[in-house]
Amino acid sequence: MKIILASPRGFCAGVDRAIEIVERALSRSDQPVYVRHEIVHNRHVVEGLREKGAIFIDDPEEAPEKSELIYSAHGVSPEIRQRATDQKLRTIDATCPLVTKVHNEVQRMSREGLEIIMIGHAGHVEVEGTMGQAPGQMHLVQSIDDVPRLQIADPTRLGCVTQTTLSVDDTREIMDALRQKFPQIVLPRRDDICYATQNRQDAVKQLAEKAQLVLVVGAPESSNSNRLVEVASRMNVSSHLITSAIDIEPEWLKNVTCVGVTAGASTPEFLVDQVIERLVGLSKGAEVSSLPEIDEGMHFKLPADLRP
């Protein structure tokens, strides 16, 4: 059996930055460090940071007054920031810069009096944070079926943003439908879409052309991991989301001569290594290779007070 690893896969620059922020905050403080929501959507990462002393909370009020609170990579609404201020918390912002870019765009549209459509998934913490930038002016669209139901006061003054863990492929049909219904809508530029999400989906397409089975290592809560499974499935290739090597069912490998393996943007590489080890064991030996390595060339600076 052949095993092919995707490239790129795993941690993106925003996730790397968020995890490093928590680790640096823990290393410099002898006081508890609180993190609002899971720093990234992967329980192995979260548990590792919890073992080092991070305390994960949902509401700023759960942290004692004047303690330190880190915002997760998914971003937060102004309401959450105000509640942290009211609690007199010292905050560190680990929001992915690409999410911050979307927040700034929403705030700009809001100041200009536009209504704003957000393409994303209801209940996702990033969506909640972005929608909270302009309450009362935003409409959530989850699928193309939502578009005909939209009621817009002035279709000539309408903007659009997307959840960053979607991709051009995820949003193309919805954007086309929005443009048809609202010809003057201002749609996001291609570079507003998360580079890491798109790159990982492109890599899965390459895997699906070669493999009969694609395994995506990631968390059920991870939007970008779920999208990777969908990409392979749309290409009529059997695909499964697994959290770790123990989730692999031996029967999946029956009559399979090539398996593709990738990982979501918040998945640590050691989990991929364990998946490869289990696949090799189940196949009683396998040839392991990788798609050509891709350097995404992205690095986001740490907050000034955490830099070396």
Image (tube, rainbow, N blue to C red):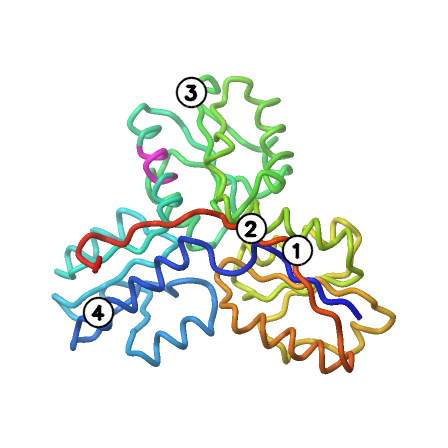
Circle 2 residue: 294
Of the image marks 3 and 4, the number of the one nearer the N terminus: 4
**In the drawing, does residue 210 fall left or right of residue 272?**
right
Amino acid residing under circle 3: Arg
Magenta residue check for 103: yes
For mark 3, what is the residue?
157
- For label 4, the residue is 63
Q: Are marks 3 and 4 in contact (CB under 8 Å)?
A: no
- In the rendered structure, which amino acid carries the disc numbered 1? Leu
Residue 279 or residue 51, whichever sits in front: 279
Residue at 69% x, 76% y is 248
In space, the residues marked 4 and 1 are separated at their CA atoms by 45 Å
Residue 19 vs 250, above or below: the answer is: above
Tag nearer the camera, 3 or 1: 1
CB under 8 Å between callouts 4 and 1? Answer: no
List the residue tagged with mark 1.
291
Could you tell me what secondary structure mostly forms the magenta stretch?
Answer: helix
* Distance CA(mark 3)–CA(mark 2): 40 Å
Q: Are marks 2 and 1 in contact (CB under 8 Å)?
A: yes
* Amino acid type of the residue that numbered disc 4 sits on in the rendered structure: Ala
For disc 1, the neighbor class at 10 Å (few under 14, some 14 to 19, many from 20) is some
